[in-house]
Image: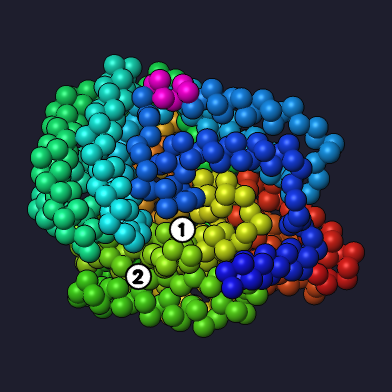
Amino acid sequence: MANLTAQSSRRWWRILALGTAAVLLTGASAPELSGLVVRYEHFAEDYPMEAGRSDPSRSREGWPGETPEGMARRKAELERIAAELDALDGATLTGEDRVNRDYLRELIGWRIEGIDFDERRFAFVAHEGFYNTPYSLARGLDVKSEAEARVWAERMRGIPRYFAEQRANLERGVATGWTHPGVVIDVAVAVLRNQIAVPAADDPMLASLTAYPAVRAEAQRLIEREIRPAQKAALAYIDGPYRAKARKELGIAAVLGGRAYYDFLLRYYTTTDLTAEQVHAMGLAEVQRIRAEMDKVIASTGFEGGFADWLRFLRTDPRFYATSREGLIEKYAAASKRIDGVLPRYFSVLPRQPFTIVPVPRELEEGYTTARGGGGGDFARGFAGTFVVNTSHLDQRPLYEVPALSLHEAAPGHHTHGALNNENPELPSFRRARDLLAFREGWALYAERLGHEMGVYRDAYEKFGSLSTEMWRACRMVVDTGIHVMGWSYAQARQCFAENTALADINIDTELARYIGAPGGAVAYKVGELKIVELRRRAEAALGARFDIRAFHDLILAQGQLPMTMLEAKVDAWIAARKRSGGEG
């Protein structure tokens, strides 16, 4: 039965491929390319943290070597694979083989360039970092036997060594001037303090061991005797010697080689050759456009007062805020089910995998973003997708943003995209991974925009909430480039959000710490969304009445992830094929 199900799944995706004019070609890959893809995937398996992005089952395995020596070995293997990809005869590769070769080569190039910049010197970025890695892996565990429980408990023994390696990376950053500013350090310190404050018996790393009390007791002793001291040592170092050498400037361009690093990050995150100056100009144009749309929505309500008065009203009127953590989760659940009811009008292919909505763990919620969608879950292993909602500071979590965030993080945004990736056996694993922010986040932001067509936003407040979250992403383009290249102050960056969005103060500060700590990534959302919108408009103009919105969406989601230039080529080929076939297929 399992084989029959797998065969049916493959046939279903092949039918989808043919239904999109054979733009997604299937069948056996060229042997030479297949061998290199396998090599790359085996390479990833040697570094479980990287492999875990696309295969969470590897989360019980050893810790990666992120020392300079380990990264040098990683680079050498990547260079060998890259050289063999370059040596392939491009004339013999067609369809998806050529796409896979070109994308894998570009992906490897980015990996090598990141290693050359010695990115591991930044071992944390605000609420994300090495100190969260054990917890992230623990949440992905599916322990089904005592033997598996012991494997995880044994792996936990490596956490102190892993922390020591990351401290050495941070020390190398201090020695070379590659440190974070204080605003990023503040968040890291808060996260570590919250983790340390949890009694060892309640530590989330033990959650999967409940059915195996002897193993759990052993792991708890390990937390008390070795892991907590390692966490305390990390906290003492980051809040002490590291903070003393904190970067005074907010922007990465201030460090040696920082501008070149930022330019690389823009290429990687946007998958384009856009410069920081071009991205900044695009962001300013979007801010102006969205602000005009906001003014129209405000006028439709009959509100008397200026824009600042309107924002003050939204931020302070109790009707717009939940009164309990459970109540906020219920609002997200209701919005998600309302969205489910209209999805079939816009998608002919939807995932089998459901998702659940859960609060951000208490030890992580301080400094954590408002909401976040997972990668779609794992049907085979019995894991639903996860939509995580921050239920702290309820007076800072406006309900008028709930529909837009549900569209973005769950369906048809991240969950739908991730689950379809997982359920598509025709995609190699590196195209199912979550590496390309421009594609992944661009699609999710497009999903927010689609909510207007779908009728998801029921009143002026929810429509404004959608525009506010879109403005949030437009301001990111302006603020990220402003901070990291143009020398903006914290006050300048904050002003863009405070004057143009309905974001609460805590959300603005959380987001700014994130952008300062992780340069470049914040701009990818809008760059990707604008490209998808451009491609849809191109298809609508070219096909007229023959344009099929469901087929267009199915085409985009069938790609897994691709750089924007490759996605554009896919859509152009699809348009040409539908023209030839009269709109069928």
Residue stretch in magenta:
68-73
Residue marked by disc 2: 357
Q: Residue at x 11, y 55 (%)?
A: 201
Q: Position of residue 501 (x, y in %)?
A: 38, 58
Q: Does residue 279 appear anywhere in the picture?
A: no
184 vs 110, left or right, is: left
Q: Is residue 110 above or below residue 148?
A: above
In this view of the protein, can residue 56 be seen by the observer?
yes
Q: Secondary structure at mark 1?
A: loop
Q: What residue do we see at 29% from left, 30% from top?
A: 166
| Residue toward you, 507 or 90 | 90
Q: Residue at x 15, y 49 (%)?
A: 218
Q: Which residue is mark 1?
A: 375
Residues at marks 2 and 1, CA–CA distance in whole angstroms: 13 Å
Amino acid beneath label 2? Ile
Indicate left or right for 243 with 266 as reference.
left
Q: Which quarter shows the C terminus?
A: bottom right
| Comes first in the chain, label 2 or label 1 | 2
